[in-house]
Image (spheres, rainbow, N blue to C red):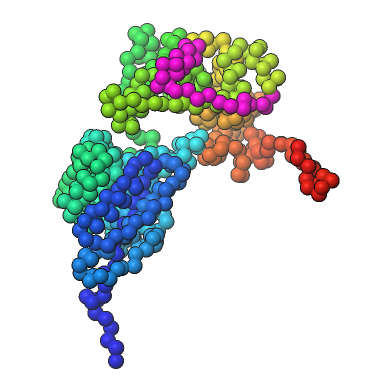
Amino acid sequence: MNAETPAQSRPPRPLCILIAALGGEGGGVLADYLVDAASAQGFPVQSTSIPGVSQRTGATTYYVEIYPRSRDELGGREPVLSLIPGPGNVDVLMASELVEAGRAMRAGFVSPQRTTLVASTHRIYAIEEKIRPGDGRFRDEEVRQAARQLARRALLLDLSELAARSGAVINTVLFGAAAASGALGLSREACEDAIRRAGKSVEASLRGFAAGWAAAAAGDAATGSAPEAAPGAPGKAAPPEAPALAPALARRCEAEFPEEMQPVMRLALARLVDYLDEAYAASYLDRLRGLLEAERVSCALAARAAPGLAVWMAYEDIQRVAALKSRASRIERVRGEVGARPGEPVRIFDYFRPGIAELADVLPPRLFARIEAYAGARKPGGGWCIQASSASGQILLRALAWAGRWRRSSARFASENALIERWLAALRRHAGSDRELALELAGCARLVKGYSDTRTRAHGHLAQVLEIAEAPSPGAGAGERVRALRETWLAQADGEPGGGGTSASGRGPASTKVQTVVFIPKPKPAAGGKAASG
């Protein structure tokens, strides 16, 4: 009769560690630290990696298995270790960014029976979040809540802030926090020795490791888990400090507009002065003043229109992009991001690929019309590569930026401001007669963003909702139709009104873009039986 093997006589299972990181954050180096520290303590260890395409277009994961018995105890035997993680079989998940932790949880790697989750609460927005016309950010609190529910133990810290304070890369801070949790089964000395043996920015890496260790240990001692950053729903961050304004603009802002509008308006005015000049910023005040006078009873319409109007008036063109890329503050920011030391050379390359329309936008309207008619849909075959950190690159960028002072005479300025005035006229018309329609239409300024084809689609979308507002009698429910169209477009990544959208009239599906399909006949075989080359 065979008795069941007692639990204490069964061989221990390997410790399974999954690292979810972004490109450039040293996830591979972190995996090497784990392998080195485990090997130094005599544990059998194995690691594999799945590198992503780039920073936010593909998951970059590293998998490490450590057998928690020394080779001396094994007596020459070797454990069989896996090359890939299994859902529900991960003991430690280390994530360098919050949504990376969310990806791993969605894939089933986090288990309430065995997984210790160590993750950073900071965000680096994914491509999918950035390309949506509206606010496409994932809600951080949903990931935090999932971590609390799905993990056996969740340690959530702002590791990015700790890395910045210690002058280290985030991978070493994550290493320290995970080691302090005790889930790795590695001593602090072994971990620090692994960092020293790697020989990569040793002093800074040790500071980062110590910062992560201290933060995780302090949180455990106080509450049993690491302190979390404040959730903060998207869009609820504290507003930046209002910049100083020219006295004339500041006086008008304080005297002519309600106090609750002034924080946003001061930011908008500073942006528009930087974009063009004080006279242009004053025209922003004139436009908002017209909305206040039209609605009379409150400032709700002007307040809703103010942010979108400022962004719209500061549209991005070649001159604006060149001005932003040539600023000394940008060079210093990039140097700080890559950790360059004083005197260490850093080369920055910017790639421009403007279409013919973007190049012609800077010309007067008559010249623009001629070039557009000639070029049609053709686009330039190449692009520009400008080394922004070089003297020649700075001269070229600043020359383009300097040309922005003649923006008022350009075709782009004329077309943007004509559409702005059309939108404002619709707001003033309905401010007193159909308040719901006016407020929904004011929110449609969010539709106008991007450049090239994206900008063209945005103008088309706004034109559709303006058709509703400009009808002799928009009718009941016009505001609801405008809201439905706006939210449909803002929810779609490419801005196309497909996927169940409706036309501006609300009586049928949105029209589709007609494209000609050209079939090219297959070449006839040549005399020798092979297709002729052309």
Answer left or right for 376 relative to 104.
right
On the rendered structure, is 534 left or right of 129? right
Q: Is residue 322 above or below residue 144?
A: above
Would you say 315 lies left or right of 91 here? right
Q: Residue at x 25, y 51 (%)?
A: 178
Residue in the image at 42% along x and 56% along y: 107
In the picture as drawn, the residue positioned furthest to the front comes out as 528
Say which quarter of the image contains residue 244: top left
Q: Is residue 399 among what the camera can see?
A: yes
The N terminus lies in which quarter of the figure? bottom left
Placement of the C terminus among the 4 image quadrants: top right
Q: Is residue 348 magenta?
A: no
Residue 7 coordinates in the image, percent (x, y)? 24, 76
Could you tell me how many numbered marks the image carries?
0
Instruction: Give the residues drawn in magenta, as a range.
Output: 376-403
The location of residue 423, given as percent across then percent down, is: 56, 22
Q: Where does the image place residue 277, in percent across and percent down from the top left?
A: 44, 10
User: What percent of the width, then of the height, locates residue 51?
Assistant: 42, 48
Q: Is residue 141 among the parts visible in the rendering?
A: no
